[in-house]
């Protein structure tokens, strides 16, 4: 098979998929404004990477075989659209799960490798559908008053399985080709029906996707970030969806139910750390620019806040570099990032992210949310007055400062900023999960031996 162009990608979406937004079913994604930016971003990615030839494939299907390969892949990921990034990370997570399952379930590992090849050969985009509705969080899947609140197998056939449930928070599902369903958590004996992992085409019968979006609906000139970078968020309903055996990666083996979540968490946290490092540098830049525009860059408490932001951005990037430098090989020769450094770096970056936002808002001031709109700035009567009173000094005119405030608001304090605040915290799982994994992989015995030596109690 060959790679797709932008036109080929857009044509591939007219496949009978069922997509809803604002209470209505969307018959043509290309004609709906809520999906326009997403389609433009993904289409541009297809166009940029396209190469002719039956044996061509995109760089997003690369499998790292060294730390250097992983570093190169991450550096390019930041320039890709979210759908392409999700595809790369998700498929690498599947391969990670395959290597961890191979000794006990070689058939599933082989299916995963075949699925990876299928997506690569057809130049498809994938999303990972992991988070269940969960119902009453105090109860296990078997204790819910509705067993569908965790996605489950409702029928087993000789040629496959039938699943039912819902998956939440699935970014860009509506504009992708494949849904990779995974268990949301470790299942216990007796919960075999909920231990299911598989791959489903977005247009499979029984799949419906309900979408929300943080994209601005009007006055896009006041949203310089989110008007150019937004993706739909999918609430996926799986209504008795048939999955053939070759697309089933887990069907009742509870001992492997957490393998997929852990593998996906590793790659999502690595990608999340990379984005936190980039965002950290951007926040520092915004803080310095608005301090200079306000004339407060030499005020001591502002200098201290910016210094703290600099340290934050530097430490997140250091954690990212450590995760790559300490990457570990699998028996197949594939390289995976360090569990310890990846989880520690993501935890630190996510836990302190809101403080960095607070520093920026404290430095910038109230005009972050009250600056007049660009339309007001361009009004013949009031525009000159806005420019006059938003100006601060020679070289800092009113329009420059107004636009800078709009960038900060859109990036950190409006719908897009709120989305980032939550996703930076939750991507790859919450903080508690990252603490657990970091503790599990920390060399505790070495730390204890150092302490014993200090206390004169070492036997070595």
Image (cartoon, grey):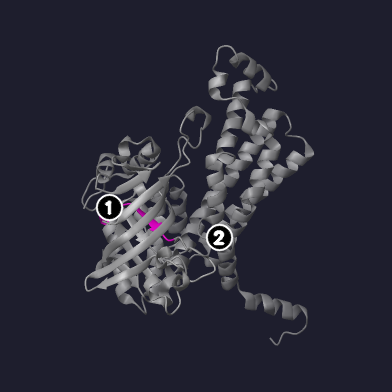
**Outermost residue to the front:** 145
User: Which corner quadrant of the image does residue 164 belong to?
Assistant: bottom left
Q: Which residues are magenta?
A: 121-130
Q: Percent from the top left, x then y, of residue 306? A: 69, 42
Picture coordinates of residue 342, whole percent (x, y):
54, 61
Q: Is residue 448 above or below residue 409?
A: below
Q: Is residue 178 left or right of residue 131?
A: left
Where is residue 279, by image quadrant?
top right
| Mark 1 secondary-structure assignment | loop
- Is 401 rendered above or below residue 444? above
Nearer-the-camera pick, 7 or 181:
181
Name the spot of residue 328 as percent of width and height, x first. Answer: 47, 68
Residue ID at (38%, 54%): 236
Query: Could you tell me residue 362's position as x and y percent?
Result: 70, 39
Query: Tag 1: Cα neighbours inside 10 Å, few (<14), some, or many (≥20)?
Result: many
Q: Give the numbered dot on residue 203.
A: 1
As measured in the structure, the alpha-carbon distance from the residue carrying label 1 to the one carrying label 2 is 31 Å
Rendered view: 190 above or below 415: below
Do the residues bearing badges 1 and 2 touch, measured as CB atoms within 8 Å? no
Q: Which mark is residue 430?
A: 2
Relative horizontal placement of residue 254, taking residue 241 as reference (left or right): right
* Viewer-closest of 80 and 213: 213
Q: Which tag, 1 or 2, sits closer to the chain's start?
A: 1
């Amino acid at each position: 098979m060959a790679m797709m162009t932008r036109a080929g990608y857009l044509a591939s979406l007219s496949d009978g998929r069922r997509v809803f937004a604002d209470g209505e079913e969307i018959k043509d994604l290309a004609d709906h404004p809520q999906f326009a930016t997403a389609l433009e971003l993904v289409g541009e990615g297809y166009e940029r990477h396209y190469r002719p030839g039956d044996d061509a494939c995109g760089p997003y299907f690369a499998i790292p075989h060294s730390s250097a390969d992983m570093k190169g892949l991450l550096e390019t990921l930041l320039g890709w659209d979210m759908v392409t990034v999700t595809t790369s990370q998700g498929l690498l997570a599947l391969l990670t799960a395959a290597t961890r399952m191979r000794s006990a379930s070689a058939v599933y590992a082989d299916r995963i490798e075949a699925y990876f090849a299928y997506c690569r050969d057809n130049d498809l985009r994938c999303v990972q559908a992991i988070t269940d509705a969960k119902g009453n969080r105090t109860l296990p899947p078997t204790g819910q008053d509705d067993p569908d609140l965790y996605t489950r197998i409702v029928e087993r056939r000789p040629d496959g399985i039938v699943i039912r449930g819902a998956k939440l928070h699935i970014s860009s599902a509506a504009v992708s080709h494949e849904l990779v369903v995974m268990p949301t958590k470790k299942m216990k004996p007796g919960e075999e029906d909920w231990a299911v992992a598989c791959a489903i085409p977005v247009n499979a019968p029984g799949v419906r996707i309900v979408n929300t979006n943080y994209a601005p609906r009007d006055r896009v000139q006041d949203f310089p970030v989110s008007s150019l970078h937004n993706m739909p968020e999918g609430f996926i309903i799986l209504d008795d969806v048939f999955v053939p055996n070759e697309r089933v990666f887990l069907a009742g083996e509870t001992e492997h139910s957490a393998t997929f979540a852990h593998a996906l968490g590793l790659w999502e946290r690595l990608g999340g750390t990379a984005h936190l490092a980039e965002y950290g540098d951007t926040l520092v830049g915004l803080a310095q620019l608005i301090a200079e525009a306000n004339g407060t860059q030499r005020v001591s408490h502002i200098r201290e806040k910016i210094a703290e932001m600099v340290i934050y951005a530097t430490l997140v990037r250091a954690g990212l570099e450590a995760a790559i430098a300490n990457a570990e090989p699998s028996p197949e020769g594939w390289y995976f990032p360090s569990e310890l450094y990846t989880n520690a770096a993501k935890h630190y970056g996510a836990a302190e992210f809101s403080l960095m936002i607070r520093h920026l808002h404290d430095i910038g001031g109230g005009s972050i949310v009250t600056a007049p709109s660009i339309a007001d700035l361009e009004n013949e009567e009031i525009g000159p007055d806005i420019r006059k009173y938003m100006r601060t000094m020679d070289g800092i005119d009113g329009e420059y400062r107004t636009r800078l405030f709009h960038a900060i608001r859109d990036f950190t304090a409006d719908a897009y900023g709120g989305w980032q605040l939550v996703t930076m915290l939750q991507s790859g799982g919450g903080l508690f999960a990252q603490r657990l994994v970091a503790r599990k992989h920390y060399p505790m015995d070495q730390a204890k031996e150092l302490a014993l030596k200090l206390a004169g109690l070492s036997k070595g």
